[in-house]
Image (cartoon, rainbow, N blue to C red):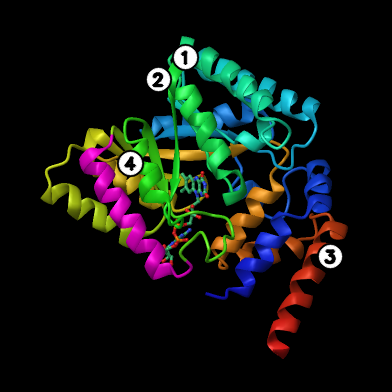
Amino acid sequence: MDNPVRDFFISLSDNEFLNQAAKRWGLKLGAQRVVAGITIEETMKKIKELNNQGISCTIDNLGEFVHERNEAIAAKEQIINVVKAIHAHEVDAHISLKASQLGLDIDYDFALNNIEEIVALASEYGIFINMDMENHERLQLSYNLLDDLSKKYDNIGSVIQAYFYRAEEDLKKRHNLKIRLVKGAYKEGSEVAFQTKEAIDANFIKLIEWNLLHGKYTSIGTHDHTIINHVKNYVRKHKISKNTFEFQMLYGFREDLLISLKEEGYRCCSYIPFGKDWYGYFMRRLAERPQNINLLIKQIFNKKTNTMIGLGIGTLIFARLIKQNKK
Ligand SMILES: Cc1cc2nc3c(=O)[nH]c(=O)nc-3n(C[C@H](O)[C@H](O)[C@H](O)COP(=O)(O)OP(=O)(O)OC[C@H]3O[C@@H](n4cnc5c(N)ncnc54)[C@H](O)[C@@H]3O)c2cc1C
């Protein structure tokens, strides 16, 4: 299904020049609403606030386009610092990481060693590591990393993206791991992925139901109240314990809903992105939910915002919108 606004923001998220530039801007354009902070200390503060409301957290050290070994090593060291901070601050949190940030695009064994170093230390502290899933190009290699590491460590799990045709097969191979189920965030072609919301939602529900009955532990990563209500009815009907699954949402999105789920006795987890590499993550969130564009536009015209950044991105948006209106 054609969705030009979504495609536009996905293409902005892939823009390497803007990505690099954004690292120097600090949190701008409303990104501070969905990114917890730049530093580990700022992030720990937000996590403690959420923990106080009974919500656990998964921490993502933001980062994309890692093609240099030294950048991948720096990312590994930063994630190791986060593992140590979780331990030192005694917060209820674990790690979400991306294989491409740790060198998957450079060399498989290099990435494997980097991730293993993190998993091994986290294992000593009893901290869980989730491997986030990226685009189709990286999918099989990421699962290979997961399968290699899960033979040695029991503190690692991953994500299944319901938009892929192969998702059911991938899930069934890994039902003994803690799995996060999501719809899928990247732009994928019809040769590998369902294209309509109806087909993606149907597969998402099918995978959730299967894993709730057969899986080790299910994290359901969604802001979709229809899916959430379906899950609530399903677990009630099948007498599935509330201790065997949790709802996960991205930081800054539908916090009220997450808190009300917590109050109803469901386990809840907030996905906490932090760091200077916020740009690609933020653009993908705009792609998913065009309502968030209001937020971006307000920030662009906020006097305090760096005018150059605002004008650059603003021009790109308006040029694209005018072009679409002409069609
Ligand atoms: C914790 C977590 C981890 C994730 N990890 C990955 C990953 O590793 N790999 C990956 O590819 N993707 C990941 N994603 C992204 C995911 O794949 C989806 O792209 C994203 O969650 C959007 O889909 P959705 O299920 O939230 O609902 P959507 O299909 O975006 O929305 C469905 C409906 O829900 C309602 N809704 C949605 N958002 C809001 C809102 N903010 N406020 C009010 N109503 C709303 C609207 O009615 C909307 O029509 C993750 C998502 C979460 C929450």
**Stretch in magenta:** 195-215
Marks 1, 4: nearer the viewer: 4
Label 1, label 2: how many angstroms apart (C-alpha)?
8 Å
Residue 129 is inside the magenta segment: no
Residues at circles 3 and 2 in contact by the CB criterion of under 8 Å: no
* Residue that label 4 marks: 172
Q: Is residue 200 above or below residue 79?
A: below
Instruction: Assess disc 2: are there few (<14), some (14-19) or many (≥20) residues with their C-alpha within 10 Å of its C-alpha.
Output: some
Marks 1, 2: nearer the viewer: 2
- The amino acid sitting under disc 3 is Leu
Mark drawn on residue 311 = 3
Query: Which percent across, then down, holds residue 265?
Result: 24, 39
Disc nearer the start of the sequence (4/2)? 2
* Residue that label 2 marks: 154
Q: Residue at x 53, y 14 (%)?
A: 120
**237 and 207: which one is in front?**
207
Task: Using the rendered view, name the quadrant where residue 189 is placed.
Answer: bottom right
